[in-house]
Image (cartoon, rainbow, N blue to C red):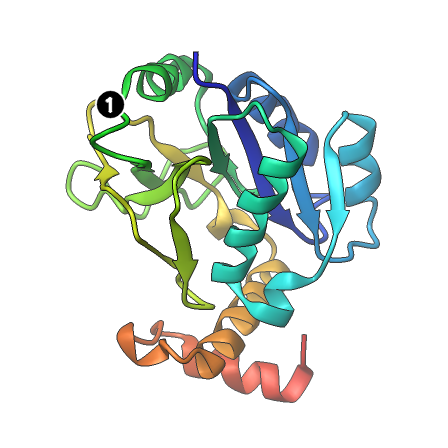
Amino acid sequence: MRPLVIASNMLMEANNDLEGWIENMQQVTDLGILVVDGGSTDGTKEILEAAGVIVITDNIIQREGYGPARNQLRKLCKENFPEAHWMAYFDADERINEKDIHFLKWVQNYLNESVSDVVAFPRIDWFDKEKTKSNNDIRIVPDFQARMTRLNAPLEYIRICHEQIVTTKGIFCNIDVCPPIHHFHRSASKDKRDYIGKVCAMLHSKDPYGHTYPKHHKEDYYFDLYQKEGL
């Protein structure tokens, strides 16, 4: 068995069905859950800790960006779960269907270590929590997310926005085996979506690798909003 630990970065998620996320991730993990909280004041930390989640307070995403935040998660998981082989990170608005978890476990325990040290999952972008309408069909636009990494691999994340993995043996992404991530960002409140938009626009403007990826179609709007309102 190759034990898996779950990790995440969060901020102000108490009203985003956080209990549902914890319950879902407890079904996925073998060892536990670790969350780096950006300084929530809405009870997020208390809900997580009451469920036995390890919580560390640090606003690293605002300060340094997503790449450094992912590197930090890997470091913290190695320190807190030394027996872990894999780390997977999922945001508070993401879920893995219970019926698909056995696919994840198959990949986790049987993927050849000499072939790949990263696993990517297709992601479905839902407009509503009832999953009646999606923004993409994963058979046409799979939106692969490289979310599960071997903790013994010397890989690293770069870019402070739209992070990218370097020094990897390979990324395993099989639409028939890797279970989909169900993503509910579009059903979040406007304030939540605006906040994330502002953070990403701000980070992109400061990213030394910013020229390597295009602007989001609403990025100028969010950057103007960031300049007017801050974070």
Which residue in the protein does label 1 denote? 112
* Residue 200 against residue 27 in the figure, above or below: below
Using the image as rendered, state which of residue 177 and residue 166 is in the foreground: 166
Residue 171 picture location, percent across and down: 25, 40
In the rendering, at what x and y percent does residue 38 appear?
A: 71, 57
Q: Secondary structure at mark 1?
A: loop
Position of 178 compared to 187: left or right?
A: left
Provide residue 149's location: percent of width, then percent of height. 40, 37
Quarter of the image that includes the C terminus: bottom right
Please tell me in which quadrant of the rendered image residue 30 appears: top right
Identity of the amino acid at label 1?
Asn
Please tell me in which quadrant of the rendered image residue 133 appears: top left
Residue 97 versus residue 60 in the image, above or below: above
Q: Dot 1: few (<14), some (14–19), or many (≥20) neighbours within 10 Å?
A: few
Residue at coordinates 56% horizontally, 56% vertically from top-left?
69
Q: Nearer the viewer, residue 218 or 40?
A: 40
Q: Nearer the viewer, residue 76 or 67?
A: 76
Indicate the quadrant containing the N terminus: top left, top right, bottom left or bottom right: top left
Q: Percent from the top left, x then y, of residue 216?
A: 36, 72
Instruction: Tell me if residue 192 can be seen.
Output: yes
Q: In the displayed structure, would residue 20 be above or below residue 208?
A: above
Q: Residue furthest left?
A: 140
Q: Splitting the image into 4 quarters, where does residue 47 fall?
A: top right
Q: Residue at x 54, y 66 (%)?
A: 65
Foreground residue among 91 and 53? 53
Residue 17 showing in the rendered view: no
